[in-house]
Amino acid sequence: MGDDSARGNALYYGDNLTILRQQIADAAVDLVYLDPPFNSAQDYHLIHKGQETPPTPAFADTWAWDTAAERAFADVVQGEGAAARILLALRDLIGTNGLLAYLTMMAPRLVELHRVLRPTGSLFLHCDTSASHYLKILLDGIFGAANFRNEIAWQRTQPKAHVSQRFSRAHDVILWYARSPAARLRRQYVPHAPTYVASFYTHVEPATGRRYRLDNLANPNHDRPNLTYEFPPGSGVVRVWRWTRERMAQAWAAGRVVVPARGQVVAYKRYLDEMPGTPVTDLWTDIEHLHHAHQEHLGYPTQKPLALLTRIIAASTREGAIVLDPFCGSGTTLVAAQRLGRRWIGIDTAASAIQLTQARLLAASGPDIAPPFTVVGALPTMSADGDHRP
Ligand SMILES: C[S@@+](CC[C@H](N)C(=O)[O-])C[C@H]1O[C@@H](n2cnc3c(N)ncnc32)[C@H](O)[C@@H]1O
């Protein structure tokens, strides 16, 4: 077993199952984000943006029940773990077909990804509704259903296809599983909606132009003798308050507790510019799906936005953490990790993906922050027509 997994900043060219088994130690990783093929029945090509070069094949996402699938299935089910039991049950349920071949590819990889996570670690599996319900069963078995944290719906700005027999599919699914209850969420925020600001932050301070709302300081619990006192002192208003007398006096002295109007009870002045925003929920509608007009888009098929990976990494890891993307494609996760001061490990089986990721990482790192990184695995040379020759 190599020791790169402990250091991070390594890009592996090859099949992720082999690399995980041979190179990545147990409990070495803080976050796994994977965006594998989705079972979409399509082949994908790298478009060379702004160049005459024809598209380069990148990866296939077509699955069939063939002898390779049968062998892979036999390998998994000879084990005794949850993945083996679930695959056997799924064979009874759905039969031997492309979907079972796809799930057979995913199962041992999910087992390895579970193995390499630290107890405080998390896995985010990006997929869509083609197979998300089966993948969730696999993850429930491998991680334990109690470690399921969220099914995030990431809204696409453009639906996948316009169809007449059903509603257009307009979201991807991201399943979050924790390695154990010790995994922590670092809360993320989005700016408040303008309608929310207009309804709640209705006051503007004339001297500063700062917008604020007035929050009720009365305590809904009436049986709190230690919080029952007259405020403001000498006003004759005795109530059960939310805060202690000392805290109330401090906030009053700081001008944060005010009498809104003559005869009204005091309220807390909460400034909009001090609030972090609205906590992010499991419905993500604020991150645009990449298309060719975006400068960030490099022509890699199914490339994900940096903003998406930035949110996932910031929400689930601290600085210095190791982030692993075993299907790294154009390297979005690795670039986001590097920018956030995390270390990273990327794996991909497509030479075009590794080359693009390498170039992207070099471009993304300024001369002062450029961390050295290792590329493991001999890449084939590329011919003039963009094809890779082994
Ligand atoms: C959906 S793309 C990932 C896109 C990526 N998230 C991005 O932002 O560019 C899936 C990637 O998985 C890679 N892949 C497929 N099977 C693999 C395997 N067995 N081992 C390693 N990589 C694999 C493909 O080459 C492809 O680049």
Image: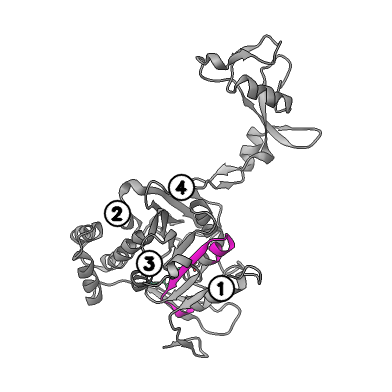
Check disc 3 and report its element: helix, strand or loop. loop
Q: Residues within 10 Å of mark 3 (few under 14, many from 20)?
A: few
Label 2 sits on residue: 137
User: Which portion, as a residue range, is magenta?
Assistant: 335-352
Q: Amino acid at mark 3?
A: Ser
Name the mark nearer the viewer: 2 or 3.
2
- Tag 4 or tag 1, which sits nearer the N-term? 4
Viewport quadrant of the N terminus: bottom left
Check disc 2 and report its element: helix, strand or loop. helix
- Tag 3 or tag 1, which sits nearer the N-term? 3
Label 1 sits on residue: 372
Name the mark nearer the viewer: 4 or 2.
4
Label 3 sits on residue: 40
Label 4 sits on residue: 184
Query: Residue 66: where, in percent of width, then height?
Result: 23, 75
Q: CA distance from mark 2 to mark 3?
A: 19 Å
Q: Would residue 347 be seen by someone viewing this image from the given angle?
A: yes
Query: Residue 177: where, in percent of width, then height?
Result: 38, 52
Check disc 1 and report its element: helix, strand or loop. loop
Q: Which of the 4 image quadrants contains residue 205? A: top right
